[in-house]
Image: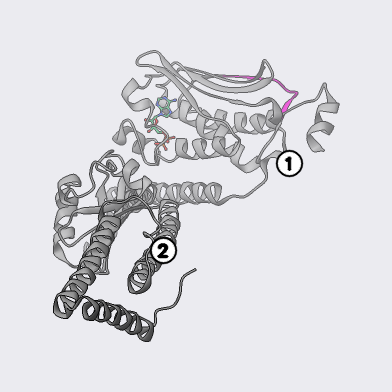
Amino acid sequence: MYNPFSWLRSVLRITLFFVVVIIIGLIVDRLILAVALGAMWLLAVQFWQMYRLNQWLWRSKRMTPPRSKGFWEHIYEGVYYLQRRHRRKRKELSKIVKRFREGAEALPDAAVVVDSESAIVWCNRLARIELGLRWPQDAGRRIDNLIRHPKFIEYFNSDQYSQPIEVPSPTNVQKTFEYRIKPYGEQHLLIMARDVTRLTQLEQTRKDFVANVSHELRTPLTVLNGYLEMLQVSEQVPPELFSKAMTEMSIQSVRMQGLVEQLLILSRIEASSERVFENRVDVPQMLAIIETEALTLNQEKHHTIEFDVDSDLRVYGSDTELRSAFSNLIFNAIHYTPDGGNIRVSWQRQGHRAKFCVADNGDGIAAKHINRLTERFYRVDKARSRKTGGSGLGLAIVKHVLSHHNSKLEIKSQVGKGSEFFFYFSEELCIDKNHPEDEDMHLQ
Ligand code: ADP
């Protein structure tokens, strides 16, 4: 049982010890020698206790202190108490650190902590995956030796961290990361990297789109302005020049109107939240109307156009969107096939699916263009496409419509032989007149 320390008790003990020593000294008539021996004994005992304390602190693996009495018992217990308190604190701290690390691992961004020497102190799992850091091998290495992009190094050394920067990923150049640096504590820096690839791509697409639209609109506007200026300055315009100006101006304004209409259709389709799977579309009837329009358009081209339509094959979908997709593909075939060509439009069942196909025997398209045809404003031959009044948006509209109907445009083409544009509608979208229960099933 541990007794609390008492100065009085300690002084009494020493006094008692020396009283006994003095009595013995008087009995043996050697008082000085007895007192000296007594003091030496006391000293030796203190040294022995110091030796034990030292052994326990530095050598022994035992947690509990050696047994002792009096003053030394108090010192041992004090050290033991401090050790236990320290251990408890350490446990609490390591729990806090563990919880903090778990939180930091769950961050949606890559995070790296560096010290005042730019050496890595810690990084989370995303930093290992996205920034290619290795843990623990890279602990203590300078961050600017591992992320070496000049833009990052300039930002890191600038001490101006109010704005983030965008830098390609060190592991994958296709990816872009937004880096933010936050100084904290004793000259430590927290570096956060977020994957902003999608955002930058969207931003780029938006910029390209605005640039393309402006470019496309500027050309007809320049022509219109040119003619208007000419008509204003010259008082007597020869009649043949006047009629040429009028024709050209009307062509350009029709072109601009077409472009704006196509843009509106495209943005409407993109923003549409129409539930395509609830609305029935009578495709055979729709194709019959488009056929009449195609024949009118074909008057100058003299193609042979053949429609092969399954009159019972209807689908679920968006009426306006599908009309736009079908007519874009059919009118393209008429526009891009040299006079007197053959065009075949078919709408038939293929297995459980429905297939729409427009085939022509025109000039065909070189393989390198095929993957890019559905990009907005992409045209194989800009000059020729402009002559036909093409805006380069037709196939982009088709692509969006089809993706809205869970389908995809496929293109097969051979230069000099012709092209085939086709797509399939899945079984779930098809309604068969011969199987009315099909209709009921879909409508449930
Ligand atoms: P446009 O409004 O210019 O017709 P589209 O997006 O409809 O734009 O078509 C993109 C390009 O694809 C066209 O400029 C044309 O070069 C090519 N193209 C489309 N359909 C055909 C086809 N049937 N035969 C050959 N080329 C075609």
Residue at x-position 84% and y-position 33%: 440
In the picture of the structure, the residue carrying the numbered disc 1 is: 278
Q: Which of disc 1 and disc 2 is earlier in sequence? A: 2
Q: Which residues are magenta?
A: 306-314
How far across and down, in percent of the image, does residue 317 sit? 67, 38
Residue sitting nearer the eye, 291 or 301: 291
State whether residue 40 is above or below residue 330: below
Q: Quadrant of the C terminus?
A: top right
Residue 226: image x %, image y %? 25, 56
Q: Is residue 149 above or below residue 310?
A: below
Vertical placement of residue 220 versus 33, above or below: above
User: Could you say which quadrant of the image residue 162 lies in?
Assistant: bottom left
Q: Amino acid at mark 1?
A: Glu
CA–CA distance in space, label 2 to label 1:
72 Å
Under tag 1, what secondary structure?
helix
| Residue at 37% across, 45% down | 125
* Image coordinates for residue 352, horizontal then vertical, percent: 69, 19
Name the magenta segment's main secondary structure: strand
- Contact check, label 2 and label 1, Cβ < 8 Å: no
User: Quadrant of residue 290 in the image?
Assistant: top right
Q: Residue 96: horizontal and vertical position, in percent?
A: 43, 61
Q: Quadrant of ligand 1?
A: top left
Q: Which residue is mark 2?
A: 84
